[in-house]
Image (cartoon, grey):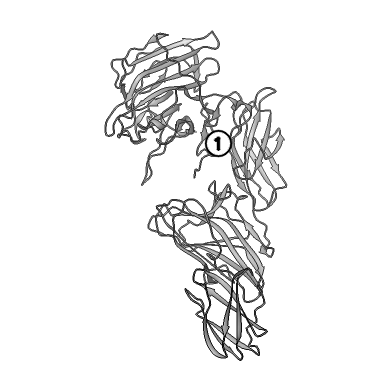
Amino acid sequence: MGLFYHVAFWSRLSAATLLAVGSLTAARAQTFAYPANEAYNAVSAYTDLGATGTAIATANTDDANSDAQAIGFTFNYNGTAFTQFVLNTNGYIKLGATAPVAPYFYSSPQVTTGGPLNSTTDTNLILPFNTDLTAGATSPTEYRVATTGTTGSRVCTIQWKNVSDKASTIATQYANFSFQVKLYEGSNQIDFVYGTATPGVTGTAAPRTVAVGLKGSSPADNQLLTVQKASTFPWSTSIAQNRDYPVATGNASPTGHNVRADATVLPEAGRTYRFTAPTCRVPTNLAVSNLTTTSATITFTGPTNGTAYALIYGPPLFDPTQSGTVVQTTNTSYTLTGLTPGNGYDLYVVAQCGANSQSIGSAPLYFSTPCTATTIVINTFPYVENFDALQEGTIPCGYQGLDVNQDGYTWGTLVDYGNSAPSALAYVFNDNDPTIGADDWVFTPGLQLRAGYAYQLQFSYAAGAANYPESLEVKYGTAATPAGQTTQLYSAKSITNEAYATTAAGQVATITPPADGVYYIGFHALSAPDRAALLIDDIRISESRVLAVRNATNTVFTAEAAPVPFGETLTLTLNTRKAGPLQLTLRDALGRVLRRSTMAATVGTSALTVPEVGQLPAGVYFLNIEQGGESQVLRVAHQ
């Protein structure tokens, strides 16, 4: 189950797809000229420079800088016009004539500390594959630059050929690798183009943290663009972000642009990361205010040359290229109307800059309309809730959450984790204090139930991770409080299935209210400390009429069943005034016939074993007894 996704806008994606945009909030202004949501990931062609251009001399292939090299044209980057660069053998360049200074790579091969990205000294860096590099298994190792094309549209290609990551505390992961940086005249576009890699020795695969991206004036997030991926994932899944890589904490592994000696996840020849400096910038600083049950005011910052804007909104995780509602405005503030109370929305903004230029869509803004003040009571069945219209962290209108242990971690909607896409109700463990377990309730809205009817709860459930068992109990009662939940419907102390399972007949006890009234069903998370997530989805409550129950004695016989609830056997004690055949019919709570049998009854008191009941699912059943023209119905339960 993944938490990041990407949105592709308009026809410009016919040749390439956007790099997924990870952890970038819509409220963060992007002051760096290369926004993450305009980074592309595609496969083109890798063309080795051969003898084209000029070889770049370095003192060695390990931690060396070149002299200043000519780009061949003026390249504008971070507000400065550059005509030169300095190559470092560790997979990056610094624009200008000044050489970079140590540290030239991360402080060890599996961390994201130290290195050029975090340096407060070096600025204006372009890092296609920054790690501790040395000569590769194939000779010769070479660095080269070539400027090609005609004036106004020239391309400067800088190449590292036949290099490898240096063995240290882990073995070499790429025994041989070649890659290039391409700088484009006029557009100031930057491409990272990769050749194929030769994996290291079989059996030595381990994640190596590599820095891939761009750096402006400082290590601040708004001066960075980094590309991130896990070592076991293909390069096509890389995520672009306008921030630095996270530093490992606790059990979390550092995630840069990680690679490993695994032939199944090597880059394809021509794998290309493309970074553009658009002329029509993406709207930023999206915010929502003046929320009512049916309206919301959206504000944002448009590009300086913006002339009009399109707002596209819809339910969480909708695809704005395929659906959603579009409104247009020439202002950077707009009030949406006609919204639904208690619903979640995603919203994107696209800028128009004159007649012929537009931005791609902004990062999404997430918001929810408040619920109405009216108390919600459900009186129409079946009642269904799939949590799909909700924004992350919220619960449906009418639901009530209770954080009994008051640790701040409780039930809420989790987007992109649903059984029915996209969302589910989730309890997520306390990762701030792994000594605190779950003690958290979420109650349905009030349910108007009737005596003489049976109500069956069904739901789907899963654990966030199979090796972290979760615990859940479900009860019902007359109040949305722990004390008011008096009857247990379901209990599972070790939920380990990552794929959703749906409760089957007999797994959840049937609700047979003793009197008309408002009742509540409570889901109680009881997981041990330091678990993962408990997921609930697709709640359904159905109603059916209970068959008439006649427990009064009749003129022919009386009958009693024991034990109740029964286990492997159910015994019927019969006192009859005349002999004759006895017909038994067993029905479930929905009135469906499960068993029929005929037995011989003798005058007086006798004990009869009801056949074939030991394998029935747990639940409530009705046993109809007929003899001598009279009948009696007994309500029994199986555990």
Classify residue 95 by image quadrant: top left
Classify residue 320 by image quadrant: top right
At horizontal 28% and vertical 17% (from top left) the residue drawn is 60
At horizontal 65% and vertical 30% (from top left) the residue drawn is 351
Residue 123 in sight in this render: no
At label 1, counting other C-alpha atoms closer than 10 Å, the crowd grade (few under 14, some 14-19, many 20 or more) is some
In this view, the residue in front, 343 or 11, is 11
Where residue 622 sits in the image (x, y, percent)? 60, 75
Please give left or right for residue 173 compared with residue 599 in the image.
Answer: left
Where residue 547 sits in the image (x, y, percent)? 66, 74
Please give left or right for residue 372 compared with residue 405 in the image.
Answer: right
Where residue 403 sits in the image (x, y, percent)? 50, 61
Please give left or right for residue 73 compared with residue 310 in the image.
Answer: left
Which amino acid type is shown beneath numbered disc 1?
His
Q: Which residue is mark 1?
A: 6
Is 63 placed above or below 550 here? above
Is 630 placed above or below 318 here? below
Where residue 226 sits in the image (x, y, percent)? 45, 31
Q: Which element type, helix, strand or loop, lies under badge 1? A: loop
